Amino acid sequence: MTERIVLAYSGGLDTSVAIGWIGEATGAEVIAVAVDVGQGGESLETIRQRALGCGAVEAYVADASDEFANEYCVPTLKANALYQGHYPLVSAISRPVIVKHLVKAAREFGATTVAHGCTGKGNDQVRFEVGIQTLGPDLKCIAPVRDLALTRDKAIAFAEEKGLPIETTKKNPYSIDQNVWGRAVETGYLEDIWNAPTKDIYDYTATPEFPPAPDEVTISFEAGVPVAIDGVKVTPLQAIKELNRRAGAQGVGRIDVVEDRLVGIKSREIYEAPGAMALITAHKHLEDITVEREQARFKATVGQRWAELVYDGQWFSPLKRSLDAFIEDTQKYVSGDIRMTLHGGQAIVNGRRSDTSLYDFSLATYDTGDTFDQSQAKGFIELWGMSAKVASGRDIRVAGK
Ligand code: ARG
């Protein structure tokens, strides 16, 4: 029986050419698998037809947009995960859900190998292959761009020679990856890290310099999950989409960073994640009133480690699973409403309320109704500083000798 290879298919030039390229190099039949993670653009049926037109024996499309929002974006939100303090893991969280569907398709179609279109320089090859090793340890992996020398020039020549139903002339100097959680743009002119991004780079966000009138929004959460916007019930996918639109119109969520890739390279990336950044901001502010101080401090460290693991392709690892359990436990009381103003590139919280809040007006107030016993502060400070005071006494004594 002819060997079968499942290819992670985006509908673009490289993976379209990869269908025939893999076939010629290996003699295998190629099954193209496209996964909808809310990237927008062409319809899945158009993409499916193109894969078949490029020689795939089967083309399978998975609508994973709700699954992606519920099982990948929501945990990222609960973790307030920002890699290196900036990047909300847009591409990093889409790889594991794509891997899940690739492995599923490999089982369904009796494939022995999974292929993806990543180069040998990025994080995504690691995320795909580590994911496949974990979910389908018996499956082999190939990357035609990296392992079968499929360069862009060769891809264009191949497409023209075979008359493939794909546009080869459209010249876009950028490498773009997008889904409902955000958009990542790199290469070309951006590789000079002094160059400011030009306007044409952005798609999810409008220029924040000339914003429309401020937009006030109330986001309601239940146990860390967004459940309503301005009082209207929403699913997580709807919440992200609605905030992509509203925060995007105000230019919220533009990020320009040089980040540390897992393979040791520093690379420049432009992100736009209006919905994700508005949600993370709101969620963090709700945690500020509902999560106990020590738990909150520790959670910040856990969230950072969680972001690093996910960035580094360890989505399915035991440590990531353990951290998920911790984070989930912290979300029990993260319920309530956050009101924020979206304007001029910023999402600024100006109101919060929660039935499970730890904010105690009678403890906090400086006005009448104060129940805080200030007389206890003096003794507390005395003991709190004791250890450092003893050490300082020693330091002075030793220095004086
Ligand atoms: N640097 C990001 C990451 O590793 C995004 C990678 C994909 N970016 C792109 N523009 N194609 O998660």
Image: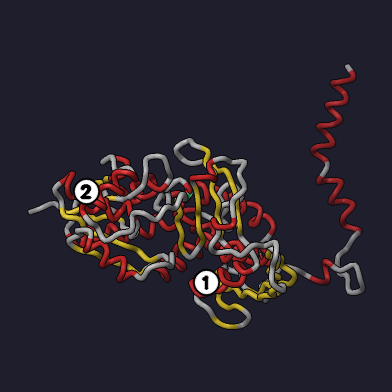
Q: In which quarter of the image is residue 63?
A: bottom left
- The residue positioned 53% from the left and 78% from the top of the image is 234
54 left or right of 3 in image: right
Residue positioned 83% across, 71% down in the render: 362
* Nearer to the camera, 120 or 394: 120
Q: In this view, does 392 lie above or below 170?
A: above
**173 or 275, which is in the foreground?**
173
Local crowd size for mark 1, using a 10 Å CA cut-off: few (<14), some (14–19), many (≥20): some
Question: Residue 392: x and y, percent?
Answer: 84, 31
| Picture mark count | 2
Colour scheme of the picture: secondary structure
The C terminus lies in quadrant:
top right
For label 2, the SS is helix
Amino acid on which disc 2 is placed = Ile
Q: In this view, does 348 lie to the left or right of 261?
A: right
Can residue 303 be seen at all in this image of the molecule? no
Q: Which numbered disc covers residue 22?
A: 2
Residue 344, given in percent of the width and then of the height, sits at 70, 64
Is any atom of residue 172 visible in this view?
Answer: yes
Q: Find residue 374 and report its image quarter.
A: bottom right
Residue drawn at point x = 44 percent, y = 54 percent: 321
First in residue order: circle 1 vs circle 2: 2
Residue with the mark numbered 1 = 241
Q: What is the quadrant of residue 99 in the picture? A: bottom left
x and y percent of residue 295 in the render?
63, 56
